């Protein structure tokens, strides 16, 4: 049917089908090998409605940085600022992450930053298991495409999701783990550090291990 036919019948705006774009997200989950790069993956999940968080989001926060970074930081989920701007860690916790990067003599452009969940949970509540399940394949694909040498899991949700464990972050942090053969260092989330500044010393110890690993020491 032609658009002009619809207009002649009095349809001046086309009905929105959420499935048109969502099909792309479903395809990206069903056939990960068909996704060739991060730009294509990001395009596929635009409009995703695989979980209820899509109803309230302003922007999907896919991730940002070097698509071939040696180091990837994985956080929890976008907050208010991230939802508004569409970029990860641009709020208060992000300013602390910038300071951590500065201390590591790195910039955001040299690393890749993303989250387990790509859409903001209302009132910044914890992500629910079904939301993590719906979104996790996209994180898996991001990591597969980037092929980093080291992953830093920021906080409980990133560490427990990537390592498939329920062990508390306080026990996971500080030692090396593995995600699909990639060395993974869990550490405290910057938002936790804002509430518990004494944890910064531990995070710095963890980041020193990350730097040694990256420099091949
Ligand atoms: N906290 C996160 O885990 N991710 C963000 O992008 C911002 C805050």
Image (cartoon, rainbow, N blue to C red):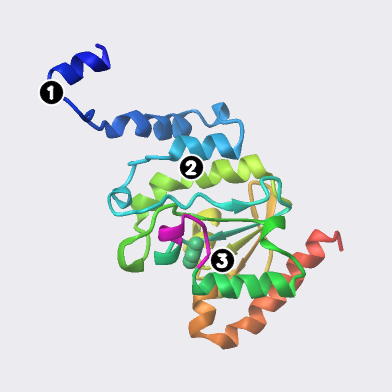
Regarding mark 3 in the picture, which secondary structure is present there? strand
Q: Which mark is residue 217?
A: none
In the orientation shown, which residue stands out farthest toward the top?
Answer: 1
Mark 3 vs ligand 1: CB under 8 Å? yes
In the orientation shown, which residue stands out farthest toward the left?
Answer: 9
Above-or-below relation of 3 to 80: above
Image: magenta residue range: 82-90
N-terminal label among 3 and 1 = 1
Q: Nearer the viewer, mark 3 or mark 1?
A: 1
Q: Residue at x 37, y 60 (%)?
A: 127
Task: Quickly name the residue at label 3.
Answer: 154
Above-or-below relation of 164 to 6: below
Q: Which mark is residue 137?
A: 2
N-terminal label among 2 and 3 = 2
Locate residue 142 relative to residue 138 in the image: left or right: right
- Tell me if residue 115 can be seen: yes
Q: Residue at x 69, y 69 (%)?
A: 101
Q: Residue at x 71, y 63 (%)?
A: 107
């Amino acid at each position: 049917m032609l658009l002009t036919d619809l207009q002649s019948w009095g349809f001046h705006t086309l009905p929105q089908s959420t499935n048109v774009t969502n099909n792309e997200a479903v395809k990206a989950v069903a056939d990960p090998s068909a996704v060739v790069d991060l730009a294509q993956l990001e395009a596929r999940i635009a409009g995703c409605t695989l979980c209820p968080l899509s109803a309230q989001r302003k922007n999907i926060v896919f991730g940002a940085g070097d698509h071939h970074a040696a180091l990837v930081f994985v956080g929890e989920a976008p907050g208010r600022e991230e939802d508004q701007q569409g970029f990860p860690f641009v709020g208060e916790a992000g300013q602390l992450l910038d300071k951590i990067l500065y201390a590591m003599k790195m910039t955001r452009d040299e690393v890749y930053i993303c989250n387990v969940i790509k859409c903001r949970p209302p009132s910044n509540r914890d992500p629910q298991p079904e939301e993590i399940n719906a979104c996790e394949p996209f994180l898996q694909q991001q990591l597969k495409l980037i092929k980093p040498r080291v992953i830093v899991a920021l906080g409980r949700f990133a560490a427990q999701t990537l390592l498939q464990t329920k062990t508390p972050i306080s026990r996971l942090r500080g030692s090396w783990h593995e995600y699909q053969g990639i060395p993974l260092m869990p550490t405290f989330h910057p938002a936790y550090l804002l509430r518990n500044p004494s944890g910064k010393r531990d995070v710095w110890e963890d980041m020193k291990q990350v730097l040694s690993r990256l420099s091949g020491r």
